[in-house]
Image (cartoon, helix red, strand yellow):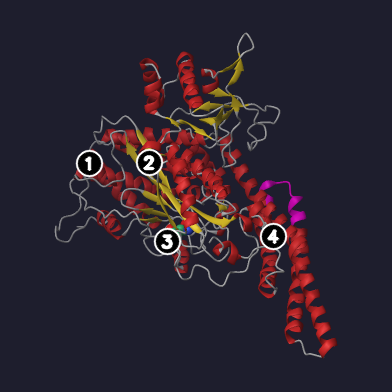
Amino acid sequence: MEKKITDIFGTLVFDEEVMEERLAKDTFRELQKTIKEGKSLNIKIANAVANAMKDWAVEHGATHYTHWFQPMTGVTAEKHDGFIGTNKNGKVILEFSGKELIKGEPDASSFPNGGLRATFEARGYTAWDPTSYAFIKNGVLCIPTAFCSYSGHALDKKTPLLRSMQAINKQALRILKLFGNENVKNVKTTVGPEQEYFLVDKKYYEQRKDLIYTGRTLFGAPSPKGQEMEDHYFGTIKSRVQEFMNDLNEELWKLGVLVKTEHNEVAPAQHELAPIFSTTNIATDHNQLTMELIQRIAKKHGLVALLHEKPFDGINGSGKHNNWSLSTDTGVNLLEPGDTPHENAQFLLFLCAVIKAADEHQDLLRLSVATAGNDHRLGANEAPPAIISVFLGDELAEILKAIEEDRPYDSKEKEVMKIGAHVLPKFPKDTTDRNRTSPFAFTGNKFEFRMPGSSSSIAGCNIVLNTVIADELKEFADILEKAPDFSSALHALIQGTIKEHKRIIFNGNGYDDSWVEEAKKRGLLNLRTTPDALPYFIKENNIELFKRHKVFDEEEVHSRYEIMMEEYVKILHIEALTMVNMAQKEILPAVSQYSYDLAQTCAMKTEVAKLENVYEKETLKDVSALLDQAFKATKHLDKVLKEAEAIEDFEKAAFYYRDEVIPAMSALRTPCDELETLTAENVWPFPTYGKLLFGIL
Ligand SMILES: NC(=O)CC[C@H](N)C(=O)O
C-alpha cells in the first residue's frame, strides 16, 4: 500500500478534527453540543458550519451537495444540488447556506410511504443528522439526513433508528443509576455488521437476465464442484479479487469506515468484509456506503458484486451478522462481564434484559429480517433457522442455571452464587463464530444476531433490537426503583427472569431437525416465510410497544408493514416474470434448436451410413420430454402470475405468491436445470454455475 492508512483515513469526512480546525471556537463548541447532547442548532451557527463545510468540500473537489437519506426502499437516496449561484452582478459564485444544510425539501412523492402520505402532498423534508458526519462521495458533499413527511411521520429508516437509540439510552441510564453510575451521561448501542457478498466476472453477469433483474440465479444446474472441498473458506485470495479489496478498503478508509477484516467465505466466489464496531446509526450509514462501494468498485475490476442472500442454489448464501452491544460514554461495554461482584450483577441484569427480550419478542426479531431473499437462507442448513433462540455457551448457561437453582456454580467454592456478592469467572472471548447455527449468539462481550440478510439495511433489525431491549430495561427499572431492598430485589429479578425465559436459551445445533421439534415443544415460534412473520408487526401489543418508546406511531407501523409485504410481492413478481422471459426467449428456443440439430444429425447419419445413432436418439427423446415439461411449466407460471397480478389486496397477494407462484417457479426450474445438463455447452443460452462460480481467474 503506497499511501499510509493513517494518512488517508477519514480524508473525505468532515469530522471533529476538521470541524475544530475550520470553525471558530464558539461555533465549534455549539456544534459539539448539538452532536453530543442533541441541542438544536441556531441558524447563525448553521450558516457558519455550512460555509466551512462548503469550502472544505470544494477544496476536496466537490461541486455539489446532497441530503443523503435512507428511504424505506432499503437503499440510499440522493438529489444533487450544485454550490453554483450568481451574485448581484450575475457573476458565478459558490454558496451553501445554513438553511440548506439543516433542511431539504425534495419532491419525494415516488418513495414508498405505505399510505403515510398522499401523492399530492408530495413534499417530504430531510433534516441533518449531525451525529453522523458529512462526507464526500463522487465529488458530492453528502449530508446524512433523516427523511420525514410534513405531518412529522418518519418516511425513512434513520429516524426510527435514532428514536430507538434514544429509547434504550433513556432506560439504560435508569438502570445504571440504580447501580450508582452517576457519571454516565449517555448509553449508545454499537454494531459491527459483517458483510458477505459474491463476486462474478462481469462478462458472465451481463449474459444473465436473472442476475441483472433480480440479483440471483433463477436457473442453473449445480457445477461438478461446489463448496464440498471446503477449500475456499479462508483460502488464498485470488490476485484480481485482492486488487479489488485493496481498492475498496482504501475508498472506505477515506470515508472513515473502519473496515478491518477480509476473507474468502464458505462458497466459491463468496467473500466477507467486516468493520470495527461503531455507534449504530453510524454503522448503519457506513454499511450502506460499504454496499454501494462494493458494487461500484467491483465494476472497475471487471467484476460484479452480488449482495443477494441466495444468489446460487445448492451452496451457501450471504448474511450480515449484526454484532450488537451497549456502551457508555465512560467507555464501559455493558455486555462485558466485569471484575467485581458489583459489575457482574449489572452485567447479568443487562444480559437478562436481552434474554427476556428475545423470548418475548421472537416475532419482532424474526420479522425484522424477513425478506423474499432471506427466506431462501434461513433454515436451509447454512444460516440460522427461522426460529429465534439465544446461544450463551456452556459456561454462561451453567452460571445462569446455578443462579436459577440457588446452587453453587463452581464446585470448588461450594458457595451458592449470590448476585452482587460473587465474581463471575471470565469467559473466553472469541471473535470467531462459536455457534454458527444460532440466530442470536453471545460471543463474550456482544450478541451476534446472525439472521439479517446480506442485502438488507441493518436499520430494521437494530430498531427492533434497541426497542425490545429498552422495553425490558424499562420494566426492570420500574421494579427496582421501587424496591425497598435493591440487592434482594435484583437477585429475585434475575432469578425470576432466568426461570421464566430459559426456554429461549439453546446451545445445541440449530441446523438439526430435532431442534425444530424441540423448539415446538418449548412453544417457540417458527415463522418460516416472510408472509408468516410480517403480520405480527401490526399486532396490538407490538404497536403499543413501539408507541411506548416513541419509535413508531400506529400509522408508521402500518406503513412499514404494507411496504414490506408489497416489497415481497414485487420481488417475486419480477423473479417470476424474468423466469417466464428467460424460458420463452432463451431456454425453450435454444433447446428446440438443439433437438432439431440432434434429429437432423440422426437422420443424416441414418441416410448416409444406416447407423444406429443411440446417442442422438436417446438424447432427443429425453430432451424433447423435458422441453415439453418446461413449456407446460412456463405456461402454468404465466397463468398463476396473471392471477397474482389481479389480486389487489397486498396481504392476499403475498400469500398467493408464496403458495402458488413460488411452487410454479420451482416446477419450471427443475426441467430447465435438467435440460442444461443434457444440452451441449455451446448451445446453452447463458453462462453456467461453473463459469459464474469459478470463472474469476
Ligand atoms: N462462515 C459463516 O459464518 C457462514 C455464514 C453464512 N454465509 C450465512 O449466511 O449466515
Q: Secondary structure at mark 1?
A: helix
Q: Residue 154: x, y in percent?
A: 56, 32
Q: Residue furthest top?
A: 88
The residue mark sitting in front, 2 or 1, is: 2
In this rendering, the answer to whether 396 lies above or below 186 is below
**Mark 2 neighbour density, 10 Å: few (under 14) some (14–19) many (20 or more):** few
Q: Secondary structure at mark 4?
A: helix
Q: What's the magenta region?
A: 641-653
How many angstroms separate mark 3 from mark 4 (CA)? 43 Å
How many angstroms separate mark 2 from mark 3 (CA)? 23 Å
Q: Residue 683: x, y in percent?
A: 72, 69
The response on whether ligand 1 sits within 8 Å of label 1 is no
Q: Earlier in the sequence, mark 3 or mark 4?
A: 3
| Residue occupied by mark 4 | 660
Q: Could you tell me if residue 9 is visible in this image?
A: no
Residue type indicated by callout 2: Ile
Q: Secondary structure at mark 3?
A: loop
The residue mark sitting in front, 3 or 4, is: 3
Q: Are marks 2 and 1 in contact (CB under 8 Å)?
A: no
Q: Residue 504: x, y in percent?
A: 40, 55
Q: Secondary structure at mark 2?
A: helix
Q: Is residue 644 magenta?
A: yes
The residue mark sitting in front, 2 or 4, is: 2
Looking at the rendered structure, which numbered label has been put on residue 487?
Answer: 1
Residue type indicated by callout 3: Thr
The residue mark sitting in front, 4 or 1, is: 4
Looking at the rendered structure, which numbered label has been put on residue 236?
Answer: 3
Residue type indicated by callout 1: Ser
How many angstroms separate mark 4 from mark 1 (CA)? 57 Å
The residue sitting at 63% across, 47% down in the picture is: 567
